[in-house]
Amino acid sequence: MTELTERPVIGITAGDPAGIGPEIVIKALGEPALYNEVKPLVFADRSILEQTVKMLCADIDLHAVNNPHNGHYEVGCIDFIDIGILSEPIAYGQISAEGGRAGYQYLDRAIDAALSGTVVGLSTAPLNKESLQAAKLPYIDHTAVLNARAALRVPMTLFLVKNLKIFFLTRHISFREIPDAITKAGILEALPLCDLYLRQLGTKTPTIAVAGLNPHGGEQGLFGREEIEVIGPAVKEAQKRGWRVQGPVPADSVFHLALEGRYDGVLSLYHDQGHIASKTLDFHGTVSLTMGLKFLRTSVDHGTAFDIAGQGIASERGMVEAIRAAGKYAIPVRERLEMSL
């Protein structure tokens, strides 16, 4: 096994305790290879971890620590910070203020640790938006909490699957709103951030492709004029400013070309455009990275799955890949936080 001093301490939050978060965390930390890459430190309640270990009939020890330096970080033992919110387990698959409050507190304490440098980066299991609302918290999701507490620049979500990297120009808006939300100014604001965040991950001179919006990139205005009037001019202006940008590249080919190595990253124009590409390629292997924070945060790209919580059937592969990505990139990102745009 790699020496302990060579492995970064990664904070892992258990997510909403009524969902599959605790299950996929426990299962992921049963993967021996992870311990060659990271020192995993879980933020959760003892009661929830004990409930999960019992449900899974897992042969694993739980080791509560007050200081990460006291962790064992060995296969068969989960080191954790006992948050002390829930003294008793709560029902699986149920929206509740208790679950929302607990999941939030796991994240809040983990952010404290990341900001202080106690852990190098975070890897998070899913929260439930309705439970957060039931708890009357001022945040709707992970992103809102992280933006409020740890934003260094404009945060962006980056999907990582195999060697494909996907950024998003717009996110959670209706399909009818998408064309109006795609502006030259917005693209020109996003591209330098995409370039910076790829460099923080270790790509020295990134080439970024901007996806097209319409079928076949609009066919010179035959199927829409956004490529001619908005996206194309933004790309040309970005090129004039010295950025290595190409596009608009038709969406039915841009992700495949990036996967083959033609581009280092893709700026997807809307939520499903990038999500469909990544999840079709490898649903459970897609990892979400939050760039632009004071530390790196990685996450699974799925929700709390209340419908299967407590059954022991959730796949941990996404959590394994999220922890692995944090171990690979957390230190390089911290070292390059001051890189200029």
Image (cartoon, rainbow, N blue to C red):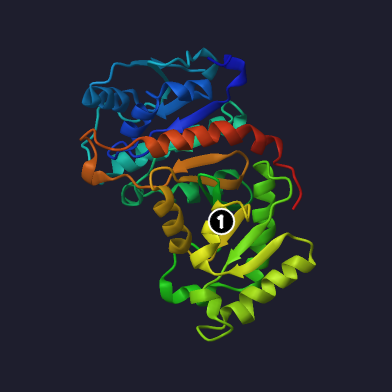
Q: Is residue 214 visible?
A: no
**x and y percentages locating residue 92 in the rendered image:** 22, 38
Nearest the viewer among 309 and 327 is: 327
Q: Is residue 37 left or right of residue 284?
A: right
> Compared with residue 36, is residue 188 higher up or lower down, i.e. above or below?
below
Nearest the viewer among 142 and 330 is: 330
Residue 248 falls in which quadrant of the image? bottom right
Residue 88 falls in which quadrant of the image? top left
Residue under circle 1?
Answer: 167
Residue 304 falls in which quadrant of the image? top left
**x and y percentages locating residue 28 in the rendered image:** 38, 29
Nearest the viewer among 185 and 266 is: 266
> Compared with residue 284, is residue 214 higher up or lower down, i.e. above or below?
below
**x and y percentages locating residue 129 in the rendered image:** 35, 51
**x and y percentages locating residue 132 in the rendered image:** 36, 48
Mark 1: which amino acid?
Answer: Phe
User: Residue most toward the bottom?
Assistant: 222
Task: State the SS at label 1.
Answer: strand
Nearest the viewer among 59 and 177 is: 59
Q: Is residue 284 left or right of residue 295?
A: left
Q: Is residue 53 left or right of residue 81?
A: left
Picture residue at 56% right of the left edge, 58% below the top: 257
